[in-house]
Image (tube, grey):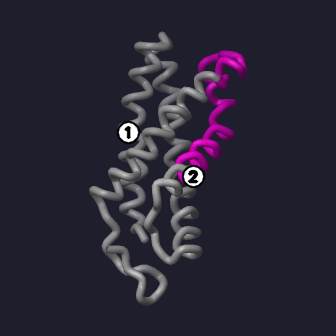
Amino acid sequence: MRTTPDRIRQAVSFEVIGLIVVISFGTRVLGYSTVDFGLLGAVGATIATGWNYIYNLLFDHALLKYTGTPKKSVKLRIVHAFGFELGLMVAFLPIVTRILNISLMEALKIDLGFIAFYLVYAFAFTWAYDTLFPINQPFDKPGTEFK
């Protein structure tokens, strides 16, 4: 299993890179002010960072319990990414409407854009992170080790 400092590094790295991309897109392509989209990004990143830590911790414990290994297949990575984004959307949609002062339908369009971006980004980032920072330690179950 990953250590707490490693999980924190993963969550913070994910959010910082994502924030740079999202704020740039929101201001340059969608035409929102840097202040509004920056605030939206900061609030969203804060919520997402907490959710990232909790979701990955629960997901990894369930994965280890049911499979005996933290290894994720491509199919499981897709399930992981969708589950993360759907949970985050539930929390984030009302915040988008409030900060950008837009209708629920407009916020839903923006949120769906975020989801599309973050599904691909989460899939690629976690795979890259697992490759760059592999888990090389024994797990809770005796005799199981990720190699």
Left or right: 103 as drawn, with respect to 68: right
Q: Residues under labels 1 and 2: Cα distance?
A: 23 Å
Q: Give the SS element for disc 2.
A: helix
Q: Residue 60 at what x, y percent from top left?
A: 51, 65
- Identified by mark 2, the residue type is Val
Identity of the residue drawn at 53% across and 30% down: 114
Q: Residue 13 at what x, y percent from top left?
A: 36, 46
Q: Give the SS element for disc 1.
A: helix
Q: Quadrant of the N terminus?
A: bottom left
Residue 124 in sight: yes
Left or right: 16 as drawn, with respect to 132: right
What secondary structure predominates along the stretch shown in magenta?
helix
Residue 5 numbered tag: none
Q: Residue 133 at what x, y percent from top left?
A: 30, 60
Q: Residues within 10 Å of mark 2 (few under 14, many from 20)?
A: few
Which dot, 1 or 2, sits closer to the camera?
Answer: 2
| 109, 7: nearer the viewer | 109
| 78, 103: nearer the viewer | 78
Residue 16 numbered tag: 1
Q: Is residue 81 magenta?
A: yes
Q: Quadrant of the C terminus?
A: bottom left
- Identified by mark 1, the residue type is Val
Residue 79 numbered tag: 2
Left or right: 70 as drawn, with respect to 87: left
Residue range in magenta is 80-108
Q: Residues within 10 Å of mark 1 (few under 14, many from 20)?
A: some
Instruction: Single out the residue that lies furthest toward the top.
Output: 31
Identity of the residue drawn at 62% across and 26% down: 96
Q: Please tell me which of labels 1 and 2 falls first in the chain.
A: 1
Q: Quadrant of residue 63?
A: bottom right
Residue 50 in sight: no
